[in-house]
Image: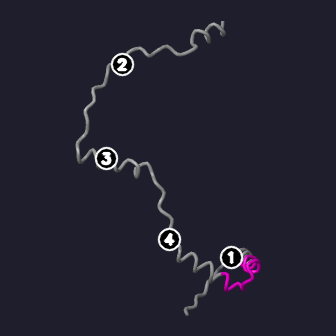
Amino acid sequence: MASITIRNLDEAVKKRLRKQAAENGRSLEAEARDILSRSATTAPPAPSKTGLDLIQPLLAFVEKHGGVELEIPPRGPGRPLPFADEARRRRK
């Protein structure tokens, strides 16, 4: 089996590790060995999705099949806001 030395370990970390080892009924070395073994054998977490990750399949589809040209309707007056008249009456 291989051995490693960890230099410049913060004293507070060592104390927490020693306490954790005692709670688990192990030596400090056995606790560190267990933590390292579990950490090295678990799969790394999947990278988090970004906005670009979510839109890339859509961009690939559009690039493959082409886009769609949509006619933009002319802008006109917006619809009246609900309760606008009632709000104006209350302010007066």
Q: Residue at x 58, y 91 (%)?
A: 3
SS class, disc 1 = loop
Task: Report the amino acid beneath label 1.
Answer: Asp
Q: Residue at x 26, y 35 (%)?
A: 68
Task: Report the amino acid beneath label 4.
Answer: Ala
Looking at the rendering, in which quadrant would you find the C terminus?
top right
Per the rendering, the mark at residue 43 is 4
Nearer-N-terminus badge (4/2): 4
- The foreground one among 5 and 66 is 66
Q: How is the image coloured?
A: one colour
Gap in Å between the C-alphas at discs 4 and 1?
A: 27 Å
Nearer-N-terminus badge (3/4): 4
SS class, disc 2 = loop
- The foreground one among 65 and 12 is 65
* Few, some or many residues within 10 Å of mark 4 (<14, 14–19, 20+): few
Assess whether residue 29 is covered by the magenta stretch. Answer: yes
Instruction: Read off the residue under disc 3.
Output: 59
Per the rendering, the mark at residue 75 is 2
* Few, some or many residues within 10 Å of mark 1 (<14, 14–19, 20+): few
Q: Residue at x 76, y 80 (%)?
A: 22
Image depth: mark 4 or mark 2 in front: 4
* Few, some or many residues within 10 Å of mark 2 (<14, 14–19, 20+): few
Nearer-N-terminus badge (2/1): 1
Gap in Å between the C-alphas at discs 3 and 4?
A: 30 Å
Task: Report the amino acid beneath label 2.
Answer: Arg
- The foreground one among 20 and 14 is 20
Gap in Å between the C-alphas at discs 2 and 1?
A: 65 Å
Looking at the rendering, in which quadrant would you find the N terminus?
bottom right
Magenta stretch, residue numbers: 17-31
Assess whether residue 24 is covered by the magenta stretch. Answer: yes
* Few, some or many residues within 10 Å of mark 3 (<14, 14–19, 20+): few
